[in-house]
Amino acid sequence: MDELVAHENRLGGYLKDRRTKLDPASFGLPAERRRTPGLRREEVAQRANISPTWYTWLEQGRGGAPSADVLDRISRALMLTDVEREHLFLVGLGRPPEVRYRAGGSVTPRLQRVLDALDPSPAVIRTAIWDVVAWNRAATVVFGDYGSAPPEQRNILRYIFLDPRARAAQYDWESVARFVLGAFRADAVRAGAAAEVEPLVDELRRLSPEFSAMWRENDVSGHHHEAVKHIKHPTLGPLAIEYSAFAVDGRTDLTMVVYNPATPEDAERIKSLLA
């Protein structure tokens, strides 16, 4: 019971702190003299479309556990950043929010420098709908030059199902394709991006009989956050690479995937191409 009370107090304290730091004028609200800084509780409740009484209880640490939908509405009402929204979910529900798809994903120069520093380990950053938005030189020499394709075509599903080089690089193409498709389907639904992926799905169903058949099976798979991938490189021959997936700090819609050479020999062979 004491732990529950402390949990609710942390949520209430965070809500109050965010509310009192907002400028009413930026919301088009009257700028008359106010007794306390920031928005009033009833103004936040109105913006979040929830009961003013319940919102007051949440700030006072006696409102009970809110739903994810309510926290999402409150986060928009308080104009929280992605990092602040994630913290709100952690103090309110004890878990981060689900991935939220953001169109036109891009990375900061700092994050690109992180990728570049990982050579000779290939590394990419992809969105929730598996568009590749950043990569390093090692990824280019091992998987192909993403930069040679228009941004709207830098999609992993498109590569797996439409590029003959992807099929030739896999020892068991069908198994890989099924895994990728199942994980993609789960990510797209989790991110609320079902409408955004419809054009891609329609195109792949039209151009790839294998994709069309697998898509109809409605299989969903979880992620193997750490595993070994074996590929047949056209120049280097067989390569073993250990891959790990990481969430990007502050960007729940992005995932960094790092493919670390499984042996020193594999690393040296990738280095030879980079040179």
Image (tube, grey):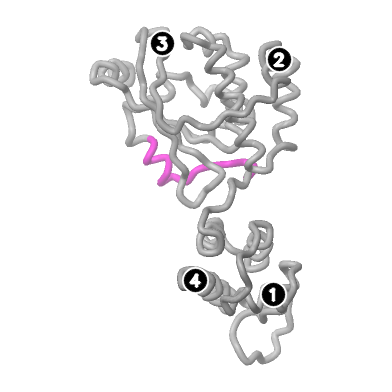
For the record, the magenta segment spans: 102-115
Q: Earlier in the sequence, mark 4 or mark 1?
A: 4
Instruction: Identify the secondary structure beneath mark 3.
Output: strand
Between the C-alphas of marks 1 and 2, the distance is: 49 Å
Check residue 106 for magenta coloring: yes
Residue in the picture at 38% in, 25% down: 138
Task: Residue lying at the far left in this picture: please name it.
Answer: 264
Amino acid at the residue labelled 2: Ala
The residue beneath circle 1 is 54
Q: Which of pointers 4 and 2 indicates the residue nearer the eye?
A: 4
- Alpha carbon separation for disc pair 4 and 1: 20 Å
Task: Tell me which amino acid carries mark 3.
Answer: His
Q: Earlier in the sequence, mark 1 or mark 2?
A: 1
The residue beneath circle 3 is: 233
| Marker disc for residue 259 | none
Q: Nearer the viewer, residue 237 or 54?
A: 54
SS for dot 1: helix
In the image, residue 264 above or below residue 130: above
